[in-house]
Amino acid sequence: MTHPTLDVRVTGRPGPLRRRTVAGLLAVWIAVAATALRAQTPAPGEELDPVTCWWRTTVSAIAVGQPFTLILTCALVETETASAVVDRARLDPKAIELAPFEVLGGRVAADVKAGARTFFQVEYTLRFINDRFFDQDVALPNLTVAYRIQMRAGNRDTATQGMERRFAMPRQSLRVTSLVSGDANDIRDAAAPTFADVAGHAARGRTLTIGGMLVMALAAVVAVAGVARALGATAWRPAPAAGLLSAAALVRGARRTLVAVRARVDAAGRWTADDIAQALTAARVVGACAVGADVSQRRAAEGETAPSGAIAVRGRLGTGPLVIVSGSTTAKTLSRLVAVTPRDGVRLDALQHVLATLTAAQYSDGAPLDDAALGQALATATDLATRLSFERLPLLERLTPWIRRRPLERQVS
């Protein structure tokens, strides 16, 4: 009986398309083998060979001492009432002897089910060492496969095994030169994909697919979180970009001023008129950047200091040119915006309270100052400036649709 063969050359590391091709060819090979071996359920009165085995080598000719792979493939009948059971312990690469070849190692592949047949495959790594066989054919081992027929009655949980039977492997030989042996009916120099090879490629493909899906899912979560963060700060928009400094630079400069005022007040133990004026000006700049209002900006002259009602800010992380800035946002302006922007009403209400407290202290006309209220207002303004500078990161600002801040800018104007 002749058996179908399959030759596929696999070089390098196969990609997904090549793995699918190899798997498809192997499936076709198994289907053809099953047809040739009558793997389908036999018709009444028809008998199937319980066990059919054949050799396959990865080369058509060998050199003395050259390792090569010898593949044993067996097809076992398995029906509802009977099945062939092979003594596979005798075929294990660690226990078998395949004279005149030396067994270097091997591996066992997982079984493959096709119709009424179950295929199993064992690979042996062999080499031949005998210098008297140059330019001659050497026969493959005369192996016999021991098996038993397992019969099942009505209860499938109980089975009986028959006497031991043997299947003699067909004779086949290899040429101990670079020529093809005389009884060869095909050329086997191409690498023959085995069950184990296909299973390994499939497992690696599944691992890479799952890894890629996890990475894509993580990227999607990060993207959604960034977009949600950007769209969440509806009312906190930067000032128009017509000035010298960006809104982020203006907020950072105002925050530095507020921190400096806190340091001076803590050192002196009391508030001065200059401290109140600078804190109020910095808070107005923060409020203007928060609602998208205009912030007055001009480059300072050589040696010029910030006048009353303005603060000096440096861009480019505090190393750029000195810019004199001031904002016109008042508590009354923010009170009008609280009603039209309920989503950011808490922040705007806090800014309104800060401006009202600092404004009342600046125009108190000598009345006693409430140091606790001023300290609370300064802390609130510093905290809001810190949050606003973080939310005005360039990436978040680019992700925010510009149309969503236009209604707020029209309210300010």
Image (tube, rainbow, N blue to C red):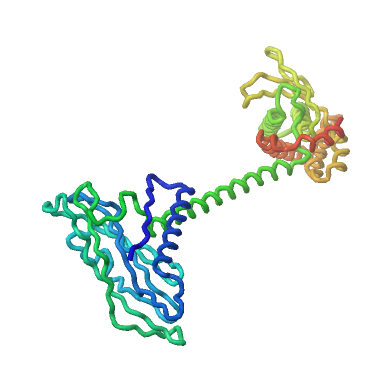
Name the side, left or right, on which 64 lies relative to 80: left
Name the side, left or right, on which 327 lies relative to 54: right
Residue at 82 percent across and 42 percent down: it is 349
- Does 296 appear above or below 173? above
Q: Percent from the top left, x then y, of residue 49?
A: 36, 74
Residue at 44 percent across and 84 percent down: it is 157
- Taking depth in this image into account, of 381 and 341 the one nearest to the observer is 341
- Does 308 appear above or below 355? above
Residue 268 seen:
no
Residue 246 seen:
yes
Residue projecting furthest to the bottom: 154
Q: Percent from the top left, x then y, of residue 151?
A: 39, 83
Q: Quadrant of residue 129?
A: bottom left
- Image quadrant where one finds the C terminus: top right
Name the side, left or right, on which 50 lies relative to 390: left
- Does 1 appear above or below 237? below
Residue at 41 percent across and 85 percent down: it is 158
